[in-house]
Amino acid sequence: MTTSIHWLRVLLGGFLAELAVFIVVIPIALLLGQRVLLYAAPIASLVMCFLFALWVGRKIESQFVLHGVLVGVVATLIYLCLDRFRPEPLAYIVAHALKILGGATGGLLAARRRTESKTVPAQ
């Protein structure tokens, strides 16, 4: 069992999670107005980081939650760099925390799936 961090997968997962947030949220904002971003961005951030942490967890052997947290951190850092670390509304700060929470939860579920697949006897 390897205990190293799979940085390429983490970076790709974080990038794709943040890209997916933009892909989901921008059309919603264009249709419904910018105020909806205060609600859509945190939800999309949680869901996308969860999904991409789950994806990262499919190909690793250990440290699932750490990998998931790192996916959320990478996604957060990408957004902060794009925004040039300017002050943000509270909803966006919450969205960043939800990215990390979503990533951790995705990693946790990936670990549980791995454990369950190893304990189920082959038929």
Image (cartoon, helix red, strand yellow):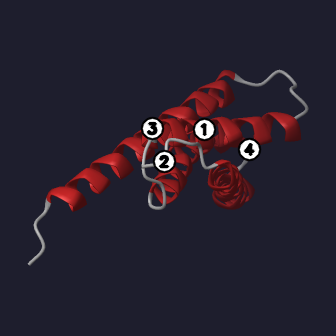
Residue at image position (25%, 51%) is: 115
Residue at image position (65%, 35%) is: 73
Indicate the amino acid at tag 2. Thr
Which comes sooner in the sequence, label 3 or label 2?
2
Please tell me whether mark 2 sits on a helix, a strand or a loop.
Answer: loop
What residue is pinned by disc 4?
34
Q: Nearer the viewer, mark 1 or mark 4?
A: 1
What residue is pinned by disc 3?
65
Where is residue 28? Give x, y as percent. 65, 57
What residue is pinned by disc 2?
2
Which comes sooner in the sequence, label 3 or label 4?
4
Does 46 sit left or right of 24 as displayed?
left
Instruction: Please determine whether, in this image, residue 86 is positioned above or below residue 78.
Output: above
Does 29 sit left or right of 46 as displayed?
right
Please tell me whether mark 4 sits on a helix, a strand or a loop.
Answer: helix
Indicate the amino acid at tag 3. Val
